[in-house]
Amino acid sequence: MGRSYKTDAVVLRSIRFSEADRVLHLYTLERGRVNAIAKGVRKTGSRFGARLEPLTRSALILHEGRGELHTVSGADIISSQEQVRADGYALAVGQIGAEAVLKLFAEPEPNPRAYEGLCRFLELLAGPLERAPDPQHDGLGLAFQLKLLALSGYLPHLDSCASCGTAGPLAGFSPSAGGAACAGCMVASGGFRMADGAIAAIEGLLERPLAPVALAPDAAAGALRVVEETYAHHGGFRLRTLQPS
Amino acid sequence: MYSPAVENLITQLARLPGIGRRTAQRLAFYILRSPPDQALALADAIREVKEKIGVCEECFNLAEGPLCSICADARRDRTVICVVEDPSDVVAVERTHEYHGVYHVLGGALSPIDGVDPEHLRIAELLRRVEANAAVEVVLATNPTMTGEATAVYIADRLRGRCRVTRLASGLPVGGDLEYADEVTLGRAFSGRREM
């Protein structure tokens, strides 16, 4: 016998399934990552309507059966993110954030701070943004990804060389050492050079509350590389949404 | 348990969408019981459709020959192009009898998270058709989903200044009750309300 439960959830991804169903990848407040099936949701007469669109935050009733997929039996919108979906740039930044959560928090383990961060990120996306030349270099998106890295245990060490401990000068970043590196350690550990001020910019993004922020091009490029290389080195993945189209 | 021929039939039927092994077994036994001409007609229909049906050179709809029946119809207005995600959407729009232009089938919708980028869709072909047909209007009829909306926004940006770009209206389904509508659908119905 299965049982039903209520949870606050954000739809991270939605995949067409069978005739008229969708499989949803959800991030929930109470259980972390959950996969669920929404039956008949693709029919125009579905009672779910727009309540299960990606990036929507909803109060869900899920039925947990014997299988791995839970079944959505009720949904009420908390925040629709309609403005985000109507803006190509904001939507692209939102999808980067959603994919980062998908990859970094893949287990059904609750993490209320990650959930609150995701909700705050989506809330900010619906407001005025500091637009970068492309969504991959957006300051809010990069700040959110850095905070997710910190919450998942990959907080980059930025105060001193992560390899030898020297206070500076810091020349670049070493994914294998897990943080900033001096010139010698950067080369020895296969790291990469970063522009002046890029490490300080990343520190700022990690320390300040999540907010739309305009980054200098060098700082944005550095933060993006740090995020991508940390994903690849520690997580063994790259985000599809970060690949330039 | 079954002879190899029956087992093969069940396996092939079970590969169809929405058909599990149990349903495949039922269908296989139905085919075994049916008269030979009926079963062979089904086999011939499958063979014929795979041999004869391709995609239309103009709009990428399903076609028996180089052009689909819509593109081959001289009465259709070639200056109005309706953009849809899949060939099944063409059938849905045609059922309305409200549209007399031509179509353009994209072959999906933009979804970076699934690795579907603009170059994976027939967007470049659409832009070329708009120029070649001297199109006056492009109707964006992608699905009202996140990926469909993202595709519509992307195409509208690319077509800005070239021709009129319109999007299908969204709102309440006919025959439904207002109280069951979700906020987004009802909100769009309100913002798109019309004078009476």
Image (cartoon, coloured by chain):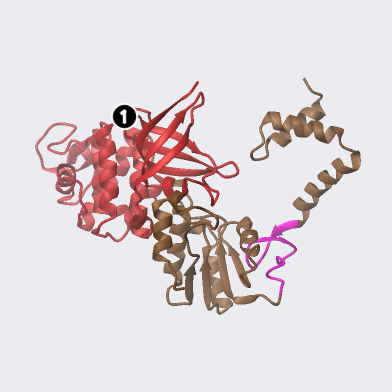
Query: Most prominent secondary structure in the magenta stretch?
Result: loop
- Residue A129 occupies which quadrant of the picture? bottom left
Query: Between residues A19 and A184, which one lies in front from this camera angle?
Result: A19
Give the left or right position of residue B191, taking residue B11 as reference: left
| Residue B183 in picture, x, y percent from top left | 39, 52
Chain identifier matching the brown colour in the rendered picture = B
Q: Identify the residue at horizontal 36%, vertical 50% (top origin).
A: A80
Q: Which residues are magenta?
A: B53-73
User: Quadrant of residue B186 in the image?
Assistant: bottom left
The colour assigned to chain A within the rendered structure: red
In which quadrant of the rendered image does the N terminus of chain B lie?
top right
Is B70 inside the magenta-drawn segment? yes
Question: Is residue A210 placed above or below A164 in the rendered structure?
Answer: below
Whether residue A221 appears in this view of the structure is no
Residue B178 horizontal side relative to residue A6, left or right: right
Q: In what element is the residue under mark 1?
A: loop
The answer to whether any part of residue A44 appears in the image is: yes
Label 1: chain letter: A
* Mark 1 Cα-neighbour bin, 10 Å: few <14, some 14–19, many ≥20: some
- Where residue A68 sits in the image (x, y, percent)? 49, 27
Q: Tell me the residue that label 1 is attached to.
A: A110
Q: Is residue B139 magenta?
A: no
Comparing B8 with A112, the one in front is A112
Q: Is residue A35 above or below residue B132?
A: above
Give amino acid for label 1: Pro
Which residue occupies the foreground of this view, B116 or B16? B16
Residue at image coords 19%, 32%: A163
Q: Residue at left 50%, top 58%? A: B119
